[in-house]
Image: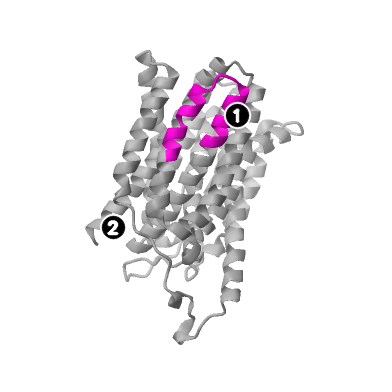
Amino acid sequence: MGRSLRAARVATFVYFALCGTVMGTWVVQIPAIEDRVGISHATLGGLLVLLGGGAFLGMQVTGPLTDRLGARLVLPTSAVLCSAALVLPALAHGVWTLAVALLVLGFCNGCLDVSMNAHAVHVEKAYGRPVMSAFHATFSIGGVLAALLVAAATSAGLHTAVTMGIIAVAGIVTALVAARSVLPTTRPAADAASGPAGQAADPQVKRGVSASRIWFLAALAFMVMLCEGAANDWSALHMKDILGASVSTAAFAYGTYAALMTTGRLFADRLVARFGPMAILRCGAALAAVGITAVAVTPWAGGAFAGWALFGLGLSGCVPQLLSAAGHADPANAGAAVSRVSGLGYVGMLAGPAVIGWLTHLVPLNRAFLLLTLFCLIASAAAGVLRPGRSTVRVASGRPRKAACSDR
């Protein structure tokens, strides 16, 4: 394995951590910015739609651009722009300036999200073994780092704009330093589209099969990331409002979910290499279904904590496998494929809290979580889309894999 490939893998870790740190900084600073600008929670909720809309637009623009220009140019540029855009919300002094700031930050975040995932697909392909989940774990670690940095800055009495400016400058420098290790990705040769025994495959048929599979993967990503979004916004409220936990105790519900998700992603690549991505999606989504069902029916705080833990652990490996499969399904257009799956998944993450909120007008919050159970079961049942033979990533070892969760 060449030194340049190892350096490219490290650079990918850096960009994922950078993205997590930048967006984590914004999330942690939301209360301070809301108070300084002087807006209500309802107004902030509307402005956050612009953040999501900007991210979705950035994803759709950057996917094809990454395929055309290569990740070596697009990824560092996106990381620099995303880091610089972090300062904008801190400089806003009214609703309209904050709206523009969030739209720009969302767009730049979408650009970075797709370009770093597209590069991760190329790194994984070069390695010849699963490495995608660990990258996503690094994103989560970046969010934790952001919380620690902002807490330290607040304790030191730094102004919000100064804190976000320092992190932005550090992000720009980090992005530029890591740029030289990004792989010089190119479009695959023309013979990659040929069929078995040297027979040329029908390009229109190949594109049609790839496109339909990409959209199916995107639909699964929508459901899985909707579950993630619901957990982000409703886990603590469930503990407080349904089970009567204190505010401090309720906060541990999300912490438990997030910690198990990060831990699961750190180990998921080894499990994928041993059992295959189909088994990880099938077993993981099934485990998540068990977890969220336990949350929905248990009257005890301990049972709810266990349920949120299983939910986070089960979901941890699902999205990375869907993004990896999208990138490998059409290597010539990996960026565009990843942008579709990531984009629709992001819509699901944004929609999750709203969907659960709407359902609470009809049923109690804990019963609304049964919709997440349904989505997890659908994802588990549809895991055959990742069946071995449809992905270009192979287990490097010649040893046969053990079957898991009907991976056959």
Between 280 and 132, the one nearer to me in the picture:
132
The answer to whether any part of residue 364 appears in the image is yes
Residue 77 vertical position relative to residue 88 in the rendered view, above or below? below
Q: Which is in the foreground here, disc 1 or disc 2? A: 1
| Image point (47%, 68%), residue name | 388
Q: How many residues crowd around disc 2 within 10 Å: few (fewer than 14), some, or many (20 or more)?
A: some
**Element on which disc 1 rests:** helix
Q: Of 5 and 393, which appears nearest the observer?
A: 5
**Nearest the eye: 138 or 300:** 138
Q: Position of residue 102 (x, y in %)?
A: 55, 32
Residue at 71% over, 31% down: 364
The residue wearing badge 1 is 99
Q: Which residues are magenta?
A: 81-105
> Image check: 49 left or right of 266?
right
Q: Position of residue 314 (x, y in %)?
A: 50, 47
223 in relation to 202, above or below: above
Please tell me whether residue 396 belongs to the stretch shown in magenta: no
